[in-house]
Image: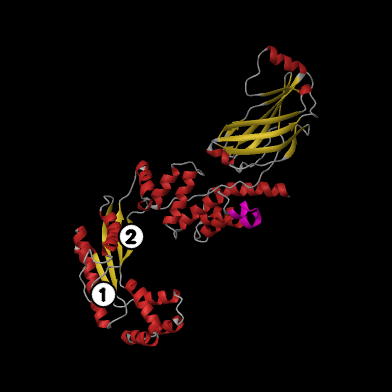
Amino acid sequence: MNKTLYIGLALVFGVAGAKAQTTVMDGQVEVSNIDVTRSSGNVYVSMDLDVARLEMKKNREVILTPELRDTEGNVRSLPDIWLVGRNRYYYHLRNDSIAEGRFFYRKSKVSSIRYEASVPYEAWMRYADLMMSEDVCGCSDLLLTGDELLRGSFVPLYAYVQPPVEKVKVREIKGSAFIDFPVNETVIYPDYRNNPAELEKIRQTIGVVKNDSDAQITSVSIKGFASPESPYDNNTRLAKGRTQALKEYVQRLYHLSPSVFTTSWEPEDWEGLRKYVEASALDDKDEILKWIAKDMDPDQKEWAIRSRHPQSYTYLLKNCYPALRHSDYVVEYVVRSYADIDEAKRVYKTSPGKLSLHELYLVASDYEQGSEEYNELFETMVRLYPDDEVANLNAANVAMSKEDMKAARKYLDKAGSRPEAEYARGLLLAMEGDYEAARPYIEKAKAGGVKEADECLKRIDRLTVKEK
């Protein structure tokens, strides 16, 4: 008879594994301090066996074999434990039949055994069980017996989702330029005041894309703003003219077609002023905010603030208004696709934003699930695409694999309602031990076609039956 001896190898790889005390051989051998861990590419198994009560005739022997097994039929045997009677002991010595790596003992000379062994880690072992096979033989008899050692804690089986292919990879970069203009002028002077630094900011954004052979700029939109002082009509002229000046500067600098540009302007940036005042420590900021919110002629509004709050107005004119004279720009561009994994890996190291979610997923799939590289890629995906449902779902799986349930919940809040997301929500509950709450989610996922759900339900059933 060969029965499963479960030690869920959630086997919490990387930390101490399950520990238990049980018996085999019809209660004759007590097994305790069972420990399964993963480290440096190996799985380490240790346990204590108390064999004092084992009855052993001198012509008999017992062979215990710890094994790792999963539900897919994968098996890895660990070194045998041989317990032999007096005659069998000398028989093996005379015939030199004691292979290296076995734990070989003469029963009358030992009452307890400390077992420690390791095997190279393989991915399937993450979901394996620890089993004990018993091969009891004497003379011509051969009996196969087994008894349950331990069912461990819930072993998760994650369901990652491959993102769809992004046929056209459209990206955008945004920036703000605070170009200094002489009073009432709309001409850009590259060396005027702080313009060298501001124009360099543009070159470090637009220029990086323009000079990238993998990218093609498809549009550049520029919106210019002026500050509220002076007449509104004049501010309209300045905002419009300065926006046009910046467009022509960028167009000449990068030889872009006029057709890629769109421009707009806002004569006075009252919204920027509102945000600044709201965050300030001005004593009269509430009154100033009321004026800003009024629906009235801009020139009259600006005059009311200046005349009623002269001290604060002077402060704003010096510290806030210069920042209200700015040009915001958005550069939209298309990035080519990367079909070769090795090329995608190189791009990931320098410019991960150029890769689509699908491409990042393919790079991740080239690493072992649960490895540092694998996890880092999925965490990068959700940073680059924070609102994408698939990115959040996969990041939740990574968080659960690292036992960071708080982060997993945060990601699952944005993972949508696809079957895999429902499965992940059930998985989180199961990992926390709430199997009854987990079951409806996982059953719903099973109905939705999540292949991992059936095995997950079996694992829950195994644990809940044990508890009953």
Give the side of residue 104 with respect to residue 363, left or right: right
Magenta-span inclusion, residue 432: yes
Residue in view at x 65 percent, y 56 percent: 436
Name the dominant secondary structure of the magenta segment. helix
Q: Is 146 or 46 nearer to us in this picture? A: 46
Residue in view at x 75 percent, y 36 percent: 23
Q: Secondary structure at mark 1?
A: helix
Give the side of residue 375 with respect to residue 225, left or right: right
Residue annotated with mark 1: 239
Q: Amino acid at mark 1?
A: Ala
- Which comes before the other along the chain, label 2 or label 1? 2
Q: Is residue 256 visible?
A: no
Give the side of residue 155 with respect to residue 289, left or right: right
| Region rendered in magenta | 428-438
Residue in view at x 26 percent, y 50 percent: 213
Crowding near pointer 2: few (<14 within 10 Å), some, many (20+)?
some
> Could you tell me residue 280's position as x and y percent?
44, 75
> Could you tell me residue 250's position as x and y percent?
23, 62
Residue in view at x 31 percent, y 76 percent: 227
Residue 30 image-quadrant placement: top right
Is 423 drawn above or below residue 141 in the view shown?
Answer: below
Instruction: Tell me the number on the disc at residue 172.
Output: 2
Q: Nearer the viewer, mark 2 or mark 1?
A: 1
Q: Secondary structure at mark 2?
A: strand
Magenta-span inclusion, residue 387: no
Give the side of residue 117 with respect to residue 252, left or right: right
Q: Is 336 or 372 nearer to us in this picture? A: 372
Q: Amino acid at mark 2?
A: Glu
